[in-house]
Amino acid sequence: MPEPAPRPAPTATPRPAPTGAPGAASGAGPGAAHEPQGPPDPGPGAVPDRIALVTGANRGTGRAIRERLGKDGYTVRCLNRRSCDDHTDPVTADLGDGQAAFDGARAVLDGAPGLDLLVLNAVTRSLGTVGELSPRDWDTAVAVNLTANVRIIQAALPLLRAAGGHIVLMGSHAGERAFEGGLAYCATKAALRSVAEVLLMEERPHGVRTTLLNPGAISNLDDDFSDQKMSVESVAAVVSWVASAPADTVLGEVELRPARLGTPPAIGIDRLQHV
Ligand SMILES: NC(=O)c1ccc[n+]([C@@H]2O[C@H](COP(=O)([O-])OP(=O)(O)OC[C@H]3O[C@@H](n4cnc5c(N)ncnc54)[C@H](OP(=O)(O)O)[C@@H]3O)[C@@H](O)[C@H]2O)c1
């Protein structure tokens, strides 16, 4: 699995939580009660915009998901640490900070009548053995890969309920298959299965569907042309497909593998290319 080169972490610049947003009353937070709201009446003959929010959409798989959902007709909002190459995001947030993740989600969804699709894609890998992984890398992995997703879901839940929306959690084969040096990545991805299951139990009565999508190796870097990994466009097409499941169905968990199998060597994270 290709690992992106380390990049400098910019300063988080979330806007303050919009006080007018649903559920954003003073003191509102994860424990606050939110009344489900009905979607606004678009009027006769009008086709209401479908709104999607994608995290980590400035590069890699997230960028392809953003582009694909745009072609599908969604108005796509992004919650990124840095802006997309081709436009400036009005809100950016370092998802290593749970409050910034919550506030950023509220800010980027400001004014939206509902949220049809939430794709939680951003990730940090923080590779390192149990003996060597620094406390900081562990904390960052838990913050970005787990806590931020929960905080963004909590921020978006009133709008997801209003639209009868769909949450797609980007998991990984790493959530089920251990590899040496994968402590933080494997453990945080495994935890997403519990998040998805709880959401499936709690939120279907409110009309919100949840899918855990567990891909294998993806060629997420622009210069990776391996034919033994899935293209970002193909994974984005599966996200689109999952989100377009018939309204009385939900794909609770999807395991996705490259169609071509590499020649096994391998230890460490490369194991995940040979599933
Ligand atoms: N690549 C694979 O082989 C593979 C396999 C299975 C599953 N997946 C899953 O698929 C999803 C996408 O993977 P990918 O390989 O396409 O990812 P990627 O290319 O490594 O991109 C990661 C994204 O997450 C963002 N991000 C990282 N830390 C952040 C932070 N603190 N705050 C805000 N954003 C942050 C990055 O933003 P910056 O540009 O600011 O760093 C970037 O947009 C992930 O959930 C991953 O676990 C990937």
Image (spheres, rainbow, N blue to C red):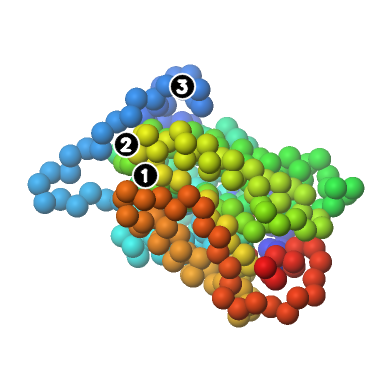
Q: Can residue 247 be spotted in the picture?
A: yes
Q: CA distance from mark 2 to mark 1?
A: 8 Å
Q: Is residue 236 left or right of residue 146?
A: left
Residue at 36% x, 56% y is: 245
Q: Is residue 50 left or right of residue 25?
A: left
- Number of the label disc, if any, that sits on residue 162: 2
Q: Element at badge 2?
A: helix
Q: Can residue 14 be spotted in the picture?
A: no
Q: CA distance from mark 3 to mark 2?
A: 16 Å
Dot 2 crowding, Cα within 10 Å, few <14, some 14–19, many 20+: many
Mark 2 is on which residue type?
Answer: Ala
- Residue 242, by quadrant, is bottom left
Confirm or deny contact between disc 2 and disc 1 (CB under 8 A).
yes
Residue that carries the numbered disc 1 in the rendered image = 165
Q: Element at badge 1?
A: loop
Dot 1 crowding, Cα within 10 Å, few <14, some 14–19, many 20+: many
Residue at 62% x, 56% y is: 172
> CB of residue at label 2: within 8 Å of ligand 1?
no
In this rendering, which labeled residue sits more in front, label 3 or label 1?
Answer: 1
Q: Residue furthest top?
A: 27
Residue that carries the numbered disc 3 in the rendered image = 32
Indicate which quadrant contains ligand 1. Answer: bottom right
Counting from the top left corner in percent of width and height, residue 199 is at 49, 38
Mark 3 is on which residue type?
Answer: Ala
> CB of residue at label 1: within 8 Å of ligand 1?
no
Q: CA distance from mark 3 to mark 1?
A: 20 Å
Residue at 33% x, 62% y is: 72
Counting from the top left corner in percent of width and height, residue 258 is at 58, 72
- Residue 156, by quadrant, is top left
Task: Decide which of 16, 247 is in the foreground and name it.
Answer: 247
Counting from the top left corner in percent of width and height, residue 204 is at 40, 38
